[in-house]
Image (cartoon, rainbow, N blue to C red):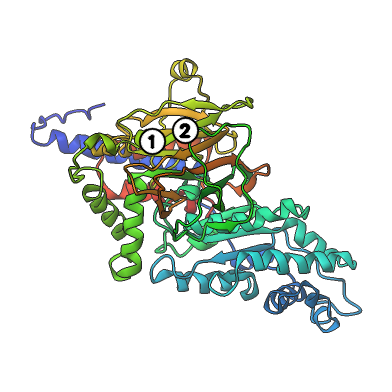
Amino acid sequence: MEPPASSSGTSRARLPESRSDATRVGVRSSLMDSMRGCGITGVRIDKEELRKRLAMPKHLRIAMRNSIRFQDPNSGLEKDQLSSGESTADAAPPEAPESPMVVFINSRSGGRHGSELKLRLQQLIAEEQVFDLKDVRPREFVQYGLGCLEKLASVGDKCADETRKRMRVMVAGGDGTVGWVLGCLGELNTQGREPVPPVGIIPLGTGNDLSRSFGWGGSFPFASKSAVKSALHKASSGQAGQLDSWDMSMSMPFGEEIEPPYSIKPSEDCCLDEGLEIEGLRSEREIHFKGVFYNYFSIGMDAQVAYSFHHLRNDKPYLAHGPVANKLIYSGYSCTQGWFFTPCSSQPSLRGLNNILRIHIKRINDSEWELIRLPPSVRAIVALNLPSYASGRNPWGNLKPEYLEKRGFVETHPDDGLLEIFGLKQGWHASFVMVELISAKHIAQAAAVRFEFRGGEWENAYMQMDGEPWKQPLNSNFSTFVEIKRVPFQSIMIHGGCGGENQNTLLTIYTSPRPTALIYELKETLPLLCGG
């Protein structure tokens, strides 16, 4: 609505400025209303009250620390350990905190802020409850730290028992770090050691798609003095939701060599479904790998770009020293390695993945494998679990109900037991998808997937799993297989940031025509500021 003209008349030159002022006032007003709705304004988080909710009694902290140090959960049962608690013979035994919190931090993430964040976390909780991943691995915490609490509970320590049941975990790092911690905590399910602690996120990586999907934002606002307190507050009281995870099994001919990322490990067993007849030739001797992913598995040019970036970061780490620099380098590689200026070959038709790849899927509630036709123009295939990919993009798109019904699709959720499989074509198509002007090439929704690589004219393929890429050699005689199935147990995630109606309001504000960096920055960091 235009502002009314003054009695003396308003010049045409001043009218756009008035409209701009009105827009600024409207945006500011709507933003403040949404912030109040999210609980940002008027809420003060007391440091001591927060510590009281999160910090474990001293005897438990020391017992856990020593159990991890000596890699023996029984170390916490020693008498001198138990006698170091706060209680005496005449005093009441210590009580378990409301939300005992353990934090894993990748201090090398977040640039120069990583070590500062670690110190701040230790000040807000307790030094023994903040683990630097270069010193303590998540599996060591699960085996020895939680094992210590369970041992103490078994000998009658009620405080240890309640602390173990109420435990929450915070991860300060990128998607790869979060997935590492989730994978280790998931072992509690198979070992019958429930409950599994829910996980919150302080985003320190480049993409942070897991963080975005659960309301923790795309980057951490280091400049805000209260941001760490706010994140811990939300992690201590936020609601828990479920997240599907996916087993990836790979079988390749013996004799081929790869440099696998840490997310996949060699395996003695082959877990391919015997119910699907193999059309290609299978080697009598094979090498097997296994891994788990939470966001995506991809094949093709996007993985090639990620592979080149990772090698550059390892060779010249000074070039990739923060999220902005990382994204610029990614953009450069996207233009030169496969998307826009692919070197011409004698047979350009060989660029399509359909020349080397055969895909079978299982649909939801269906035990039969189905062969899926792969369009010849597709040069990258992504099996996506989250509604966030490549730093917050939604390549699957928000599809209309009529289209969903026509294609036999359903609405996407992180816990629906389905992967969204889509393709990316040449560079211009991928660019329009990434800026969300169009959706990707929809291929299928699947409860299980098998990729068969046939080799032939291609010597290598590029793959990545949750941002961890590798170069996969292809044998000209024997097929390589990748099979993906859902893990029976779901991970538990803590929802952070704003939600529901307020989140939609904020998204409307962000997409307003006002082109300022402030709006983008708020979109990235506002979820972490909610609650404090």
Question: Does 370 sit above or below residue 102?
Answer: above
Q: Secondary structure at mark 1?
A: loop
For residue 300, say whether it is visible: yes
Which tag is nearer the camera, tag 2 or tag 1?
2
Along the horizontal axis of the image, is 155 left or right of 171? right
Question: Does 70 sit above or below residue 227?
Answer: below
Numbered label attached to residue 340: none
Distance Cα–Cα, label 2 vs label 1: 20 Å
> In the image, what residue occupies the spot 62% across and 45% down?
271
> In the image, what residue occupies the spot 28% across and 37% down?
350
The quadrant in which residue 16 appears is top left
Q: Quadrant of the N terminus?
A: top left
State the residue in front, 297 or 517: 297
* Crowd band around label 1 with a 10 angstrom C-alpha radius: few (<14), some (14–19), many (20+): many
- Give the residue number, with chain letter if any, for mark 2: 359
- Give the residue number, with chain letter if any, for mark 1: 395
Q: Residue 381 in the image: x percent, y percent?
A: 40, 38
State the residue in front, 499 or 34: 499
What kind of residue is marked 1? Pro
Along the horizontal axis of the image, is 265 left or right of 221? right
* Crowd band around label 2 with a 10 angstrom C-alpha radius: few (<14), some (14–19), many (20+): some
Q: Earlier in the sequence, mark 2 or mark 1?
A: 2
> In the image, what residue occupies the spot 78% across and 66% down?
149
Q: Residue 516 in the image: x percent, y percent?
A: 26, 46
Q: Residue 12 in the image: x percent, y percent?
A: 8, 31
Q: Secondary structure at mark 2?
A: strand
What kind of residue is marked 2? Ile
Q: Residue 466 in the image: x percent, y percent?
A: 47, 50
State the residue in front, 262 or 213: 262
